[in-house]
Image: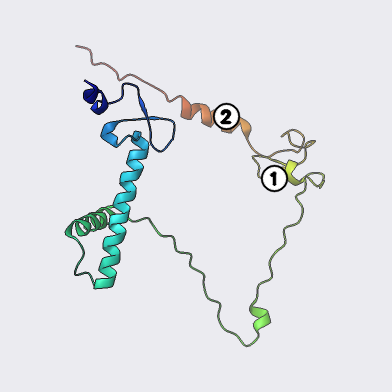
Amino acid sequence: MESTKETAAPEGPILCINNCGFFGSAATMNMCSKCHREMILKQENAKLAASSFDDIINGGGSGSDVGKDVVAADVIKAAAQPAAPVELNVVPLQACSDDSSSSQVPEVKAGPKRCSTCRKRVGLTGFNCKCGNLFCSAHRYSDKHECPFDYRGAGRDAIAKANPVVKAEKLDKI
């Protein structure tokens, strides 16, 4: 009877052998599922690295067939994925001239942002109006700066777009 107790599995839960705090099982070599998965991935990566190293050293002749199949599958997966679009920035070349200083274009320095009515500096606190101008807090409303934008017409257009006219067709009398 004592020999059966020694070979039987322990009755309590088994902690993971990596001391991660989760419970392991005999099917996963007393590891939790996460640690077991990481171990399997590390083994596969080591096999791939060894086979690719052998291919480099021996010229591709003595690598194992399993490693070649895995590498070939990776190549097929990479080829099946669509390529990312590449943006090209085209910079036009300037014509060569004898005077190099005249070919350089001076950069236009943007001045401080100012109110279109009182010319007060507004910086980051400026208000953009629908007429396209920038205003300070005192002139931000349309009645304070004589705004040429037609708010009434814009409102009518927005309502007309949001609420299309629905008419029923006329019925033919029998």
Asked if one can make out residue 3 in the rendered structure from this viewpoint, the answer is: yes
> For residue 109, what is the image quadrant?
bottom right
Percent across and percent down for residue 116 are 76, 46
Asked if one can make out residue 82 in the rendered structure from this viewpoint, the answer is: no
Q: Amino acid at mark 2?
A: Gly
> For residue 54, what is the image quadrant?
bottom left
Percent across and percent down for residue 26 are 28, 32
Of circles 1 and 2, the one toward us is 1
In the image, is residue 141 above or below residue 1?
Answer: below
Percent across and percent down for residue 5 are 25, 23
In percent of the image, x 19 and y 61: which residue is there?
64
For this orientation, the residue located farthest to the front is 2
Q: For this view, does 5 lie left or right of residue 162?
A: left
Which residue is label 2 attached to? 155
Which residue is label 1 attached to? 133
In the image, is residue 142 above or below residue 88?
Answer: above
**Secondary element at image label 2:** helix
- First in sequence, mark 1 or 2: give its number: 1
> For residue 35, what is the image quadrant?
top left
Q: Which image quarter holds the N terminus?
A: top left
Q: Count residues near mark 1 (Cα–Cα under 10 Å), then give few for <14, some for 14-19, many for 20+.
A: some
